[in-house]
Amino acid sequence: MKITQFQLDALREIGNIGSAHAATALSTLLQRRIDMSVPEVWAVRFEELSAIVGQLDDPQAVIYVKVEGDAPGKAVFFFPVESAEIVVQLLFGSNEPMDLYMGEMAQSALKEVGNILVSSFIMALTQFSGIPLQPSVPALAVDMIGASLDAIFLEEGVLDDTVLFIDTQLTGIPKIEGQFIFLPEEGSLKKLLGAMGV
Amino acid sequence: MNDVITVGMADFKTAVAPILLLTAGLGSCIGICVHDPILKVGGMAHIMLPTANGSLGGNPAKYADTALELLVRDIMSMGASKSRLRAKMAGGAQMFSFPGKPPVLKIGDRNSEAVEQELKKHGIPLLVADVGGSFGRTIHFNVGTGDLHIRTINHGEKVV
């Protein structure tokens, strides 16, 4: 599907509302201020992903949620391991470093963070479009960012030459940063845009 | 220090010893490494999906079957002998699992099966397959020695 500038603007608006909700949820959870950037909407070839995420083998925590319902898609929140460590420490009120790779406590905390972020994004989307959407349980990987993302995008064994991202940066105090991607399926995009009248 | 050429996603490169080929952050994707140990030339492809079947156009380096075809063609054009070619591969992981749901289509496994099959078709022996698991890999391939260096974040580092 060809995307017009007008539709890109509409998608940016979807991203704006969704991530504003997500940022508020994270901020409430951590009792810290979280800011978000104006979302970027990218229609890129998946191979050019490194232009968006940087070093493909950079260790990051990735929380992946499938969006089910009338306009299915995928929602992914990812942040550098250093940021993930801070988030987990804030959640547990601890100064001790926690093992994100093997520690079950830290991992389920991260999943919960992802769950809250993604759910609030999806709720905003549902309210805005009137299209019912439900998030799946979250899955987590703490590993090379390129490896995690390729597994998400290639999961079904198909790949359009162009992948559409709605991408927002969340930043906070202290030094927390993360990136949010919503990837609607092709049919879903039409429905979401249709519901918005574009 | 050897020079290093980076192979991106859905990309392939050839090189002459002592140049190293690198691809970073393999998840369900596979790095296929092929070389001629006598002539000391070789190449690497970073494939994403098993077969180009049914998808017209697009980038042929994305798929196991078409990428290997191109890789072998280019290595041969450097003077390599097909009967001397040797292959190694790494990647094909299953990075995520959802509780209660069996992984539907393990694309990593399908990728490694496809590479194996394509290598067989070309009659190229597969010496090493470091595939599967649930972790990412970054690999360096020495086209002269055939050494494949595999780095992971939390699952060790080795040369195979």
Image: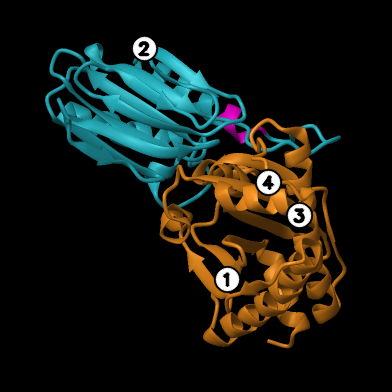
Chain colours: A orange, B cyan
Q: Which residue is mark 2?
A: B125
Q: Number of labelled discs?
A: 4
Task: Examine the rendering and report whether any part of residue A35 can be seen.
Answer: yes
Circle 1 SS class = loop
- Of the image marks 3 and 1, the number of the one nearer the N terminus: 1
Q: Which residue is mark 3?
A: A113
Tell us which disc is closer to us: 1 or 4.
4
Q: Label 4, label 2: how many angstroms apart (C-alpha)? A: 52 Å
Q: Where does residue A168 sit, x and y in percent of width and height?
A: 59, 69
Q: Label 1, label 4: how many angstroms apart (C-alpha)? A: 49 Å
Determine the image quadrant of residue A10.
bottom right
Q: Are marks 3 and 1 in contact (CB under 8 Å)?
A: no
The residue positioned farthest toward the front in the image shown: A95
Q: Tag 1: Cα neighbours inside 10 Å, few (<14), some, or many (≥20)?
A: few
Q: Amino acid at mark 1?
A: Met
Dominant secondary structure (helix, strand or loop) of the stretch shown in magenta: helix
Check the residue under mark 2 and report the chain it is in: B
Q: Tag 4: Cα neighbours inside 10 Å, few (<14), some, or many (≥20)?
A: few
Q: Is residue A65 above or below residue B93?
A: below
Q: Is residue B119 above or below residue B68?
A: above
Circle 2 SS class = loop
Q: Where does residue A99 sit, x and y in percent of width and height?
A: 66, 35
Q: Label 3, label 1: how many angstroms apart (C-alpha)? A: 33 Å
Q: Are marks 2 and 3 on the same chain?
A: no
Q: Which residue is mark 1?
A: A1
Q: Amino acid at mark 3?
A: Val
Residue B18 vs residue A29, the one in the foreground: A29
Check the residue under mark 1 and report the chain it is in: A
Magenta stretch? B106-110
